[in-house]
């Protein structure tokens, strides 16, 4: 973008007023992040991606080895925003009824009554989601996509907001199963959680030695969260930014047509149109977190890998050359012209 003025700023005369409004609204999210910093050391990119999921109503998949505070992060966030929270440990013997609920026979009335499962909460932590069998994944898919659950012959609407924050162990670990492609596509973001730095790990050690649970202050209510979602929808996206997003996603499907033929044999299939929608929404939320009323290419680049990495399926040739979807997505961002 060197030498070019921002297209969003040029196109909208109300952008200054919008940015001023969003600066006021986003202060509430700064308070959330500051409160989370009292519990979680580092991991700011993960915290921001989870907030983007909340602001856009999109599910988030967190991938990393055990012990990186993924579970603590989600449970602490639920306390800060006063959301109902349920943690579900996924295991190979888990049944769909363990998630959704089941019909219970009432002997005194002779009727079957629905007993709702733990899926009925604002925030669901699906811990080690890739350890559960296919039937459980299928049941969870309905809840994630349709925002409802069927028990017997009756469908029940889930709470609003409803978000699934799933943790996943790297697929190479023993006892894990790859998630179905249809379910992976329902996750707005796939966030890779890395080990802390040396200084961060030393701080973790200091905090754990002290022990005791850190009291967290209630910062947001669910009504506040709904208002913030409406504010995010006001963030301006210029037509050139929209074209940029479409070009990125289409390059994952037909790299040769986009002038990147060397990627063609490495990609089995690319991202669906859902990726285009999610990338635009996530970029708006990222701009909101940066207190701007308009989206820039940098917003798209920041969230792009999290939106696309799990939607680009690599071919056998790519696996043979040890090329993963992460590097393919990086090459696409390097290749597609920035507005």
Image (tube, rainbow, N blue to C red):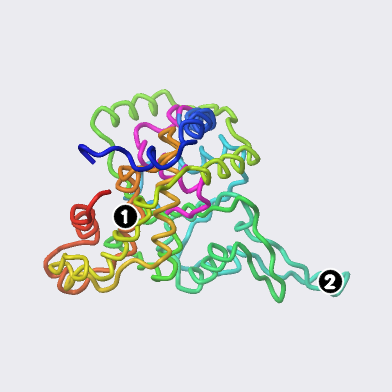
Q: Residues within 10 Å of mark 1 (few under 14, many from 20)?
A: some
* Residue at image mark 1: 244
Is residue 213 shown in magenta?
Answer: no
Chain part drawn in magenta: 34-60
Residue 299, position as x, y percentages in the image: 35, 43
Q: Is residue 94 above or below residue 206?
A: below
Above or below 333: residue 320:
below
Q: Regarding mark 1 in the picture, which secondary structure is present there? A: helix
Judge whether 307 appears above or below 110 on screen: above
Q: What's the magenta bit mostly, secondary-structure-wise?
A: helix
Residue 40 horizontal side relative to residue 64, left or right:
right
**x and y, in percent, of residue 64 in the image:** 33, 50
Residue 15 drawn at (x, y percent): 46, 36
Q: Is residue 254 left or right of residue 163?
A: left
What residue is rendered at 63% in x and 64% in y? 148
* Residue 99 visible to the viewer: yes
Label 2: element kind: loop
List x then y, in percent, for residue 315. 21, 73
Q: Residue at x 38, y 68 (%)?
A: 272
Q: Is residue 45 magenta?
A: yes
How far, Cα to Cα, is label 2 from label 1?
A: 62 Å
Q: As rendered, which of 168 and 8 lies closer to the eye? A: 8
At x 58%, y 44%, the residue is: 230
Kindly indicate the quadrant of the structure image that contains residue 175.
bottom left
Residue matched to label 2: 107
């Amino acid at each position: 973008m060197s030498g070019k003025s921002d297209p969003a700023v040029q196109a909208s005369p109300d952008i200054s007023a919008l940015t001023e409004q969003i600066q006021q609204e986003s202060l509430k999210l700064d308070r959330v992040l500051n409160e989370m910093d009292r519990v979680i050391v580092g991991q700011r990119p993960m915290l921001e991606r989870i907030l983007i999921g909340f602001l856009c109503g999109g599910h988030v998949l967190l991938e990393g080895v055990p012990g990186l505070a993924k579970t603590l992060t989600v449970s602490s966030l639920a306390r800060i925003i006063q959301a109902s929270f349920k943690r579900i440990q996924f295991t190979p013997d888990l049944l769909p009824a363990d998630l959704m609920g089941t019909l219970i026979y009432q002997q005194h009335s002779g009727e079957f009554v629905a007993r709702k499962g733990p899926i009925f909460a604002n925030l669901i932590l699906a811990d080690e989601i890739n350890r559960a069998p296919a039937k459980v994944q299928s049941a969870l898919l309905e809840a994630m996509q349709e925002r409802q659950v069927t028990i017997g012959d009756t469908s029940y609407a889930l709470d609003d907001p409803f978000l699934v924050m799933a943790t996943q162990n790297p697929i190479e670990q023993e006892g894990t199963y790859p998630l179905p492609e249809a379910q992976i596509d329902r996750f707005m973001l796939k966030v890779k959680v890395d080990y802390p730095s040396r200084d961060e790990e030393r701080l973790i050690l200091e905090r754990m030695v002290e022990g005791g649970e850190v009291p967290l202050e209630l910062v947001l209510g669910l009504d506040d969260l709904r208002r913030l979602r409406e504010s995010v929808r006001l963030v301006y996206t210029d037509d050139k930014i929209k074209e940029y997003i479409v070009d990125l996603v289409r390059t994952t499907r037909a790299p040769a047509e986009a002038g990147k033929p060397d990627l063609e044999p490495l990609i089995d299939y690319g991202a669906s149109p859902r990726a285009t929608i999610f990338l635009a929404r996530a970029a708006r939320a990222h701009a909101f977190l940066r207190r701007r009323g308009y989206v820039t290419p940098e917003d798209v680049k920041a969230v792009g890998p999290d939106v696309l990495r799990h939607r680009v399926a690599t071919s056998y040739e790519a696996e043979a050359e040890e090329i993963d979807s992460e590097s393919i997505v990086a090459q696409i961002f390097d290749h597609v012209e920035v507005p």
